Image (cartoon, helix red, strand yellow):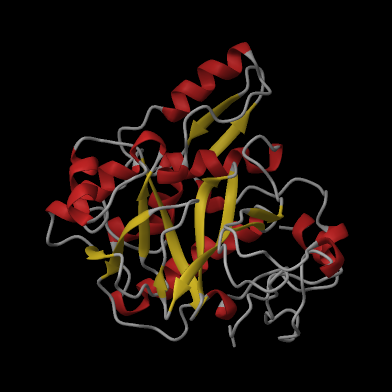
Amino acid sequence: MMGRVLRIVALGALALLAAGPAVAANPRLRVELVDRPKRIIVRDTACPGDRAPADRTTWRRRIVETAALEWEAFRFSTLDIASRGLPRVPTLGTLASGRTPRTIVPDAANPPLADEPARRLLRVGLSEDAAETTLRIGGYWAVVPLQSAVDTQNALWRIWADTGWAQPWSAAFVSWVMCEAGLPLEAFDRHPQHAGYIAHLYANPQAAFAPQPITERAEPGDLVCAGRGDSQDVANLEEGWALAAASGPMHCDIVVGGAPDRLYLIGGNVENSVTLTVAPARDGRIEPNAARRWFGVFRLKAPSDPDAAIDKVGFACLGRPDAKACLAER
């Protein structure tokens, strides 16, 4: 049960997850990293849904599971922006932990929040600069048509082989999740910018997501979107449509679960990682705050699914006492 708290990771895993060998290349990532000179070679750009779209009734759980397992691969980076009413660090009971509630950071290091808005990194996992994540991010870009990020990165590596990804990759992450979840290109227009696929969702009635006001409840598998930077003060769907049409800066996260007073979101390139964000909500409705001023819920055109939730995901390592060794084998 999600309940009032998010059960994140085994208490003993805090020290164990601090370091470890590189994550093995996932065959779904479609790329190869070679040295001398360092460069990414894209081997495959196809998505499962382009050949045979997944059953719409499974879309929600496939989206949630795909995003959640990448969060695990990035070592559970977790950001709290729920600002009011939070207890101490949330916990998560998983299949691997036998549903035992376990926390990620000792209680002594995490006093109760004050009434003022807060933004806390509860867990710092792997960043985009880590050797273990290079292939993963390259794989996100591989499925995005008309992107220049791989060529740009290869050019940069000829000058400085240790530099991280230069082009923001949060939209590529969302695009890759939709690709792996089995959504065909006509249902979700994979794009290097959030504004590109959001404009498609607004304009195409056949798209997989429908724009809804931020006052609507969000379910696992939905997207929540906000303006970014100088364009962060987007008040409603109409302003969001105008921003997307102008290719303005935006950010979207994937809803993966929640409780009445918060939602759990996973996004790419959040704090330079694949990060789970604990966001404020009321009765399942996300609340914009100073950290992220969401303007809309993009409702997945798929039925509700009780198995689409982060606490139903079959994590390989989360909650296990041998978390470090488990992750090293992936």
Q: Position of residue 205 (x, y in %)?
A: 12, 61
Q: Quadrant of the C terminus?
A: bottom right
Residue 204, quarter of picture: bottom left
Residue 116, quarter of picture: bottom right
199 vs 167: above or below: below
Between 7 and 147, the one nearer to me in the picture: 7
298 vs 198: above or below: below
Q: Is residue 61 shown left or right of residue 76?
A: left
Q: Is residue 111 shown left or right of residue 200?
A: right
Q: Quadrant of the N terminus?
A: bottom right
104 vs 4: above or below: above
Q: Position of residue 180 (x, y in %)?
A: 42, 59
Res 129 seen here: yes
161 vs 267: above or below: above
**Residue occupying image coordinates x 39% and y 69%:** 221
Q: Residue furthest top?
A: 159
How many numbered badges does the structure rendering display? 0
Q: Is residue 80 shown left or right of residue 42?
A: right
Res 46 seen here: no
**Residue occupying image coordinates x 32% and y 79%:** 57
Between 80 and 130, the one nearer to me in the picture: 80
Q: Position of residue 310 (x, y in %)?
A: 55, 74
**Residue occupying image coordinates x 69% and y 38%:** 130
**Residue occupying image coordinates x 48% and y 51%:** 290
